[in-house]
Image (cartoon, rainbow, N blue to C red):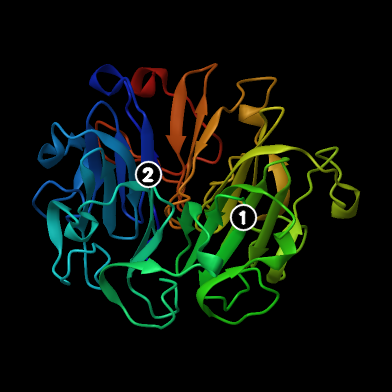
């Protein structure tokens, strides 16, 4: 899997009103008053395979009213008022068009004719969606049961997932090879690949259909996010839980052991104090998983990060891993408070964004920590959040 780039989004001038962003392994999409995309391998929806280093409007979607966008490893989705469209690579049917042919331009998914889609999520090569009626769908690569359809077969068109007691679903997220969903009653379900315990069922076994995460059965889940091989869940009362692959400390519980059941994440009282057992519980308002790192915003509007940090993606001014949350000083409340992490609840491989209202800038950090100059299309690693007012002022 190619390392992901970090892109500074130019939101000046014509790009003033950025509504939503999503990043795939090597490409990005932004929803403005129109949809723009940039990256490589023809997954940009422009009708060709040329790489782009600056955002360009997707002409095929001109005039459509976009509600949501999502990026997988090499495919994209957009939910419009008129229906759902997808484009990009399609080697496992992840576009839901009934074939395995790539699509360089957006195409409507005919299987959803007459069905109103509320939310979409994209894994590496599989896709999930929820209808306004609460029905859950899966399609694409299904080797690990990540489609939730009871087998390990690929699907070229969306198929409805049978949930426990036909419970209606409210949100969905995809990890690299696993899927996470939350019912309208706040119950958490997971299915797919679980070699590292990322399903949270207390074992390391794959599950081919949605299973309720019993450890959180008494909690109402507010938000979910899937990393490459780890999972994070936020409850309605602000408690943050993590589990799964933990080689780099991305679960955030003070060690580097893989975890197969949800464990609550605690936060340091004093940044100089490194004993996790003495950490405190803080109320969290948002969480987002990168490939091998995690970010969270607390109620005090401080942003914490942990996990893989060798390319500066944690924003601590250093290149080292962290197995517990550490505040990003450059975005602390003493400076500029963080307001939103644009989570890829939809894409495990994407770095997420933070937005600072005080300095008015947005950054999409990825696995490599690389910044791309919107004018030149290249740059170097950065290990702390930086504001380039000229280039990215909102």
Marks 1 and 2 sit apart, C-alpha to C-alpha, by: 18 Å
In the figure, residue 326 lies in which quadrant? top right
Does residue 269 lie above or below 167 as drawn? Answer: above
In the figure, residue 15 lies in which quadrant? top left
Q: Secondary structure at mark 2?
A: strand
Which residue bears the numbered disc 2?
Answer: 22
Q: Position of residue 312 (x, y in %)?
A: 55, 46
Which image quadrant: the N terminus? bottom left
**274 relative to 285 in the view: left or right:** right
- Residue nearer the viewer, 216 or 381: 216
Q: Position of residue 71 (x, y in %)?
A: 34, 52
Q: Position of residue 319 (x, y in %)?
A: 60, 50
Residue 294 visible in image = yes
Sequence order check, earlier mark of 1 and 2? 2
Q: How many C-alpha atoms fall within 10 Å of the one at disc 2: few (<14), some, or many (≥20)?
A: many
**366 relative to 111 in the view: left or right:** right
Which image quadrant: the C terminus? top left
Does residue 265 lie above or below 176 as drawn? Answer: above
Does residue 121 lie above or below 146 as drawn? Answer: above
| Label placed on residue 232 | 1
Residue drawn 70% across the image and 20% down it: 334
Residue drawn 56% across the image and 36% down it: 384
Residue drawn 70% across the image and 75% down it: 202
Q: Secondary structure at mark 1?
A: strand
| Label placed on residue 171 | none
Q: Position of residue 230 (x, y in %)?
A: 58, 63
- Residue nearer the viewer, 388 or 279: 279
- Residue nearer the viewer, 163 or 283: 163
Q: Is label 1 in contact with label 2 (beta carbons under 8 Å)?
A: no
Does residue 322 lie above or below 374 as drawn? Answer: below
Q: How many C-alpha atoms fall within 10 Å of the one at disc 1: few (<14), some, or many (≥20)?
A: many
Residue 227 visible in image = no
């Amino acid at each position: 899997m190619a390392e992901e780039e970090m892109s500074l989004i130019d939101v000046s001038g014509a790009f003033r009103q950025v509504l939503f962003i999503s990043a795939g392994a090597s490409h990005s999409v932004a929803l403005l008053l129109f949809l723009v995309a940039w990256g490589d391998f023809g997954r940009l929806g422009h009708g060709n395979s040329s790489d782009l280093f600056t955002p360009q409007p997707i002409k095929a979607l001109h005039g459509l009213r976009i509600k949501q966008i999502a990026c997988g490893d090499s495919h994209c989705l957009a939910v419009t008022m008129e229906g759902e469209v997808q484009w990009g690579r399609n080697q496992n049917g992840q576009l839901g068009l009934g074939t395995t042919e790539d699509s360089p331009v957006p195409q409507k998914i005919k299987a959803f004719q007459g069905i109103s889609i509320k939310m979409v999520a994209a894994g590496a090569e599989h896709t999930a969606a929820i209808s306004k009626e609460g029905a859950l769908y899966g399609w694409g690569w299904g080797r690990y049961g990540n489609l939730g359809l009871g087998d390990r077969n690929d699907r070229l068109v969306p198929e409805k997932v049978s949930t426990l007691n036909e419970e209606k679903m409210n949100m969905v997220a995809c990890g690299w090879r696993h899927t996470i969903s939350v019912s309208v009653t706040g119950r958490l379900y997971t299915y797919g690949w679980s070699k590292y315990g990322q399903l949270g069922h207390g074992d390391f076994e794959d599950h081919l259909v949605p299973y309720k995460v019993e450890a959180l059965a008494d909690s109402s889940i507010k938000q979910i996010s899937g990393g490459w091989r780890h999972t994070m869940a936020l409850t309605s009362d602000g408690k943050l839980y993590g589990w799964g692959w933990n080689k780099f400390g991305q679960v955030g519980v003070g060690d580097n052991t893989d975890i197969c059941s949800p464990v609550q994440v605690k936060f340091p009282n004093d940044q100089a104090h490194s004993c996790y057992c003495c950490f405190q519980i803080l109320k969290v308002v948002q969480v987002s998983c990168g490939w091998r790192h995690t970010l969270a915003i607390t109620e005090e509007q401080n942003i914490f990060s942990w996990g893989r940090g060798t390319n500066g993606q944690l924003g601590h001014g250093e290149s080292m891993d962290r197995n517990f949350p550490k505040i990003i000083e450059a975005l602390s409340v003493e400076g500029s408070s963080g307001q939103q992490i644009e989570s890829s609840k939809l894409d495990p491989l994407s770095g997420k964004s933070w937005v600072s209202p005080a300095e008015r800038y947005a950054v999409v950090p990825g696995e490599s920590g690389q910044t791309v100059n919107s004018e030149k299309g290249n740059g170097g690693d950065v290990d702390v959040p930086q504001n380039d007012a000229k280039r990215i002022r909102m």
